[in-house]
């Protein structure tokens, strides 16, 4: 299967000068497959976002246009990225990371952003999960961050949370010494874990 997919993508690249995977193709890939694909295309491949991720960015354009502009405005044909981001679209990943905004505040978090006071919540979170209880915003965000780095836009989109409210709650978590919130890309780059 993987060899056939690689051949299809080579053909697609020669015709379109970029590669795009369908959501169903990505759903079938694992880390081993990704390594094989990267070996073929690393260094010269341009990747177009998969359809689900394009849907997310169209939502972002409507809900936080300034961030969308910061990311894509200079592109005549947006949604094309470095091929090295491919692993961000397989199972349990959180899509194209929004973590280096120049003109807008960044809201990207990894496990290193969780302060000791935030880590004290883990036992309660695990107990709630074990008992199939609903997590509140704070618990859900901490849980997601521990699973994998995430930005507030993907988080809000996934859980259908009002973006303005989510940003306000992140600022509360920062004020309450639960979460480090680095809005400036130069400060944030030290934490990027991919």
Image (cartoon, rainbow, N blue to C red):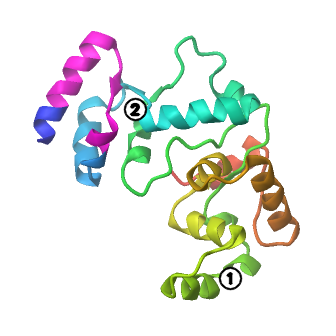
In the displayed structure, 157 sits above or below 141; it is above
In the displayed structure, 81 sits above or below 123; it is above
Mark closer to the chain start, 2 or 1: 2
Query: Closer to the camera, 185 or 6?
Result: 6
Q: Which residue is mark 1?
A: 121
Tell me which corner region of the image, top left, top right, bottom left or bottom right, holds residue 10: top left
Question: Residue 106: within the magenta?
Answer: no
Structural distance between the alpha carbons of marks 2 and 1: 37 Å
Q: What is the chief secondary structure element of the magenta stretch?
A: helix
Q: Tell how many labels.
A: 2
Dot 2 alpha-carbon crowd within 10 angstroms: few under 14, some 14 to 19, many 20 or more: many
> Which residues make up the magenta segment?
6-26
- Do tag 2 and tag 1 residues touch (Cβ < 8 Å)? no
Residue 4 x %, y % = 11, 33
Check the picture and name the quadrant holding the N terminus.
Answer: top left
Dot 1 alpha-carbon crowd within 10 angstroms: few under 14, some 14 to 19, many 20 or more: some
Q: Which residue is mark 2?
A: 83
Q: Is residue 146 left or right of residue 14?
A: right
In the displayed structure, 190 sits above or below 180; it is above
Query: Closer to the camera, 104 or 26?
Result: 26
> Which secondary structure lies at badge 1?
loop
Q: Residue at x 70, y 24 (%)?
A: 69
Question: Residue 9: within the magenta?
Answer: yes
Q: In the rendering, which numbered label is found on residue 144?
A: none
> Which secondary structure lies at badge 2?
helix
Q: Is residue 85 left or right of residue 74?
A: left
Q: Residue at x 71, y 70 (%)?
A: 138
Q: List the single residue furthest toward the right.
A: 175
In the displayed structure, 46 sits above or below 98; it is above
Residue 9 x %, y % = 23, 26
Tell me which corner region of the image, top left, top right, bottom left or bottom right, holds residue 59: top right
């Amino acid at each position: 299967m993987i060899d056939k997919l690689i051949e299809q993508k080579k053909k697609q690249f020669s015709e379109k000068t970029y590669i795009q995977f369908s959501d169903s193709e990505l759903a079938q890939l694992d880390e081993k497959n990704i390594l094989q694909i990267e070996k073929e295309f690393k260094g010269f491949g341009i990747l177009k976002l998969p359809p689900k991720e394009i849907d997310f960015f169209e939502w972002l354009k409507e809900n936080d246009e300034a961030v969308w502009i910061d990311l894509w405005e200079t592109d005549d044909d947006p949604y094309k990225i470095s091929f090295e981001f491919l692993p961000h679209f397989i199972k349990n990943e959180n899509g194209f990371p929004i973590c280096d905004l120049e003109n807008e505040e960044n809201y990207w978090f990894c496990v290193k952003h969780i302060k000791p006071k935030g880590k004290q919540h883990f036992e309660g979170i695990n107990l709630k999960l074990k008992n199939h209880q609903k997590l509140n915003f704070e618990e859900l965000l901490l849980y997601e961050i521990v699973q994998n780095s995430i930005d507030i836009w993907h988080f809000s989109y996934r859980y259908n949370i009002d973006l303005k409210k989510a940003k306000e709650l992140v600022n509360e978590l920062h004020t309450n010494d639960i979460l480090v919130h680095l809005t400036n890309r130069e400060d944030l780059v030290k934490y990027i874990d991919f």
